Amino acid sequence: LASRDFHPDDTVIEIKGTKIGGGNLVVMGGPCAVESAEQIDEIAKLVKAAGGQVLRGGAFKPRTGPYSFQGIGVEGLIMMAEAGQKHGLLTITEVMTPEYVDICAEYADILQVGTRNMQNFDLLRKLGTCGKPVLLKRGFSATYDEFLNAAEYILAGGNPNVMLCERGIRTFETYTRNTLDLSAIPVLQQLSHLPVISDPSHGTGRRELVEPMSKASVAAGADGLIIEMHTDPDNSMTGDGVQSLFPDQFAALLKDLEQLAPLV
Ligand code: PEP
Ligand code: MN
């Protein structure tokens, strides 16, 4: 079902009037994690003002260490839904377990599967019937074939609205957090009809690389970007402040991107 052979035309996912795929560029911006109602409201305002269409923010965070901040949970979902509604943005949040799919689907417009869960098959199966579009992140060691098979689980479950997200893979290089695989963008678009989104924030792990890799992703044909932005990155509650853009950088980047592709 994920294959271009089966479905020659690009899939366009329409959510409340916003079209993702098929030549439109969608920008999703926001913090790694929802921290408070004030924080997510302020960031939503800035994402909207910059021309972004989707507010990102994790309420459930998949942390490498068990003692790290794990997200504020359901309260965060509610805060983000309110901020999105108030500022006219769609929302995307990560869901980590099948049990939480229904509640995440109640509050968010798009459900994100994180890199660590790309092959959580019970979760993928549950997302097949959740009724909401899914952004599936590539596992950090997954081949394209494994990635497309993971998408296939969601599609086969009855949900046609899947976006593929390249978020960097693990290589021998340690200067960057991951290696953003730009080739994935055209390869996945050749093999599949699903929209391809690039995540230059996790893909590089370094703020100063987000702008060039965002532009490179759009030049390579990405249908969208998911970018971390924070009003106070140095004090963010996850370690992802170092890769988060300041609001003025985010706004400047979107202005530049408009020259490359219209933000619809
Ligand atoms: C995130 O988007 O904050 C995140 C945890 O991403 P990934 O699953 O790509 O690490
Ligand atoms: Mn993050």
Image (spheres, grey):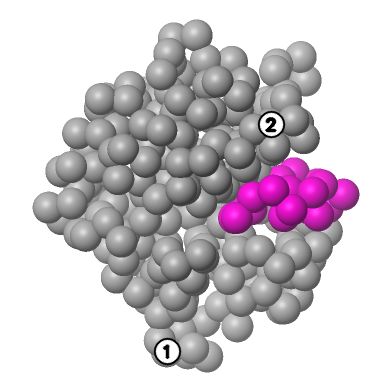
Rendered residue at 35%/46% (across/down):
52
Indicate which label's residue lies in the foreground, 2 or 1: 2
Q: Which residue in the protein does label 1 denote? A: 8
Q: Amino acid at mark 2?
A: Gly
Placement of 90 over or under 240, stated as above or below: below
**Secondary structure type for disc 1:** loop
Query: Percent from the top left, x then y, of residue 147?
Result: 57, 62
Q: Is residue 157 magenta?
A: no
Left or right of residue 200: residue 56: right
Residue 133 point in image, percent of width and height: 60, 64
Most extreme residue toward the left is 259
Please identify the quadrant where the C terminus is shown: bottom left
**Which residues are the magenta region?**
95-114
Kindly identify the amino acid type of the residue bearing the numbered disc 1.
Pro
| Nearer the observer, 142 or 227 | 227
Where residue 176 sits: x, y (%)? 38, 28
Is 108 included in the stretch rendered in magenta? yes
Report the residue marked by disc 2. 76
